[in-house]
Amino acid sequence: MKNLKLKAARAGKDMSQQQLADAVGVSRQTINAIEKGDYNPTIKLCVAICRALDRTLDELFWPEAEA
């Protein structure tokens, strides 16, 4: 499942994938794979991404409730 919330939060901070990757210590390809839903990050990486984007785990990684 694509992580559009992560992509939107990153864009909202005017950060490129490379800038976010540098901030959290991973490759740009890793950020791209997370956004595309091809990679499930570790909780440690999730927390680092949340800190870099000033968001919570719920805001970025918790799936929306289905109606």
Image (cartoon, grey):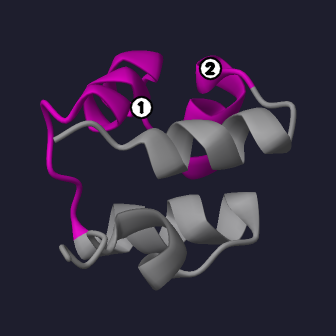
Residue in the image at 23% along x and 54% along y: 41
Q: Is residue 66 left or right of residue 14?
A: left
Query: What is the three-letter code of the residue carrying label 1?
Result: Ile
Q: Quadrant of the C terminus?
A: bottom left
Q: Is residue 17 magenta?
A: yes
Can residue 25 be seen here? The reply is no
Q: Is residue 55 left or right of residue 50?
A: right
**Residue 18: which numbered mark, if any?**
2
CA distance separating discs 1 and 2: 8 Å
Q: Position of residue 15 (x, y in %)?
A: 78, 30
Q: Position of residue 46 (x, y in %)?
A: 39, 66
Q: Kindly indicate the quadrant of the structure image that contains residue 16.
A: top right
Residue in the image at 35% along x and 43% along y: 3
Q: Kindly indicate the quadrant of the structure image that contains residue 4.
A: top left
Query: What is the three-letter code of the residue carrying label 2?
Result: Gln
Mark 1, residue position: 31
Q: Position of residue 42 (x, y in %)?
A: 21, 64
Q: Kindly indicate the quadrant of the structure image that contains residue 56.
A: bottom right
Bounds of the magenta span?
Answer: 16-42
Q: Is residue 30 left or right of residue 57?
A: left
Q: Main secondary structure of the magenta part?
A: helix
Q: Quadrant of the N terminus?
A: top left
Q: Position of residue 33 (x, y in %)?
A: 26, 26
